[in-house]
Image: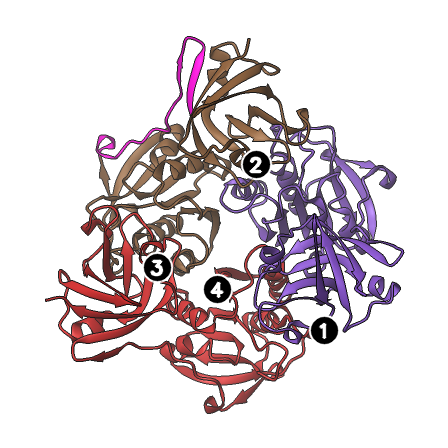
Chain colours: A brown, B purple, C red
Amino acid sequence: MRIITLTTDFGLKDPYVAQMKAVILRICPEAKIVDITHEVEPQNIMQAAFLLKVTYHWFPENSIHVVVVDPGVGTARRPIVIRTRRYWFVGPDNGVLYPAAASDGIKATYEITKKFWKPSHTFHGRDIFAPTAAYIAKGGKLNIILREIPLNTIVKLEISKPKIRAGVIEGLILHSDNFGNLITNIREEDLANIGIKVGDLLQLSFKDKSIKIPFLKTFGDVSRGKTLCFIDSYGHLEIAVNMGSARQVLGLKPGDKITLTKFS
Amino acid sequence: MRIITLTTDFGLKDPYVAQMKAVILRICPEAKIVDITHEVEPQNIMQAAFLLKVTYHWFPENSIHVVVVDPGVGTARRPIVIRTRRYWFVGPDNGVLYPAAASDGIKATYEITKKFWKPSHTFHGRDIFAPTAAYIAKGGKLNIILREIPLNTIVKLEISKPKIRAGVIEGLILHSDNFGNLITNIREEDLANIGIKVGDLLQLSFKDKSIKIPFLKTFGDVSRGKTLCFIDSYGHLEIAVNMGSARQVLGLKPGDKITLTKFS
Amino acid sequence: MRIITLTTDFGLKDPYVAQMKAVILRICPEAKIVDITHEVEPQNIMQAAFLLKVTYHWFPENSIHVVVVDPGVGTARRPIVIRTRRYWFVGPDNGVLYPAAASDGIKATYEITKKFWKPSHTFHGRDIFAPTAAYIAKGGKLNIILREIPLNTIVKLEISKPKIRAGVIEGLILHSDNFGNLITNIREEDLANIGIKVGDLLQLSFKDKSIKIPFLKTFGDVSRGKTLCFIDSYGHLEIAVNMGSARQVLGLKPGDKITLTKFS
């Protein structure tokens, strides 16, 4: 058994994802395909890179992670494979694979040279990335489909980090989840850095507003409808409303900037 | 082959479901994972209990049903396993498993004692429930991860029944389907109870509104765009708009309360 | 391993799709089930027929394609199976299977005669089509569940073709995808027919509007926010906006008529 995961911005109303799965099963019938998500915001490379980075490492070793968030499809951007310490990553050379791959430890980078069949101009997910993943899953000879390229030639994207100065953290909303919880780019160590610990009251500023929110352990620590923040299962600071949507209540969304400081 | 089903309120835009599947496949690579739904309304335990109850029994015997609709995550509520006559149920001890489990016949109830790895405060689906299901699927020794607890200590939720007094039925929206039809907890016998029969005009009240709707046999009995109610294939009263969405037209959603009385 | 694909208008918030999968796995535990889409517009047979036709042939030979878009459920319309050169198709006799099946080459047509269990009036997907597909996947004796019927007795739907006269193509929007791209029923050969080639500027008319759009190879050939058209991975002419939604920008949707001519 070999696992292939899929992360795309294709949504589920179209048959694009099914066509990728069909191609995979044609080449490697024993592959086990798992959807990470197909609801990345259209062409949002940073969001896809973030979702991949917080998820890839939960899968068994040697899983093959395919990402198709690819605004440059049909242009000269290369289709690539990254071999890391424990996993494989397959997708466009636009940086989307980089944060996950780098965090696992990159061993080699390749350009995909194999034309499985006449690739369409617009659907490399089906015509290049899915068959490449299936070919790797099947244990095919790599030098037939890949050509090693220097690591310093691929696009390197970083998940943006908060700025910290004089006791103030300037951060960013990276993602809002199904419940309207707001996932920031601020991590536990950033808070520790300026002496913030569980139980503290924080000042959260954004746009022209400024509110106080407690930094706690979990939802249940505040009553229904109250705003709080806590370290989530990604290891990121998350802003939430108990039994409600922080996105709606605060009017914050991915891409928005926030500042945090200890209230005193 | 061993089937594990998943029912959550996580939606499909986040990678939470994929992380649960990753953990399952790490522990039990041969598990077959089937999604029941991930679009339970956020934290709506009653809706999840209803959807599980009408679906679990279609699966092969020994399937393991995991439900993660868990507003109490991070509090003292216990993670539990229920062994029934033909199935296994895994989830939080908040009643969500109970209606399905009770209808199949409960044989034993357990608290999950195993810490698979340091559980996060907020994602027991990935950190406790998924690995427990995978461990059971794999045929692991149960006394290593479970401790039997008395049946009378677990939370017993019933699919809520309407209150009937003085010719008025107080009910609840249990579920809204893909077409926007509203499935209530009111049953045929409840209507008969206060003398309502097919052809009657009813007064439906909710929030600050009150409207008249006919109680008929099926959609075709009203013209396009008209609201009606009828007994559906579950034997429940369903509120619908012919060729439209009752959810949108009326502004009602699962969890909302309604009252019904015969119009005169 | 045997693949069963599912195409329905059930959506993913209800447990209907899971109930179909449960029934399949009960009869044929080794079946590999792949979702094509469950977000066909309610009861839109033409859209489902189109999505099936552009997708079925990517799957391995002998895959079994089940479609449940079935406004006539509960009426006298027959449940059927079509055996083609390389595949099986299972669904209602309303034409939805026909364009795909005919394009592969029909070898035999059957009515499903087996009552697996008491069929409900409203859910033949679970009660007839899913168990039939599973039974075929399992290699069961066909004459126990099927009765051969003449090909000329089944409903024949065609994906509508554009009209071409005097250098003008009259076409139709068949589908709009997750990005708001508009897939037309116009094919590469229709354009060639009136001398249109990549690089040409076209006049697109619809409703009371008329705009000029370039016919190019791919998105990247125009700047952000610009409208273009190109031959997509379906082999159909697609109208799109680079980094935007053509559906929103142009106000066009499935079912709308368009005319195209070479601009001069």
Q: Residue at x 59, y 79 (%)?
A: C141
Please report the bounds of the magenta region as a residue range: A150-171
Viewer-nearest residue: C218 or A86 = C218
Q: To which residue does mark 2 refer? A: A245
Q: Quadrant of the N terminus of chain B?
A: bottom right
The chain under label 1 reads B
Image coords of residue C257 (percent x, y): 32, 71
Q: Residue at 29% of width from left, 67% of height from top?
A: C206
C253 vs B26, left or right, is: left
Q: Amino acid at mark 2?
A: Ser
- What separation in Å lies between label 4 and label 3 (alpha carbons)? 20 Å
Whether A169 is among the magenta residues is yes
Residue assigned mark 4: C40
Q: Which callout, 4 or 3, points at the residue further toward the start of the chain? A: 4
Q: CB of mark 3 within 8 Å of CB of mark 2?
A: no
Kindly state the secondary structure of the residue where label 4 is placed. loop
Residue A192, percent from left and from top: 50, 13
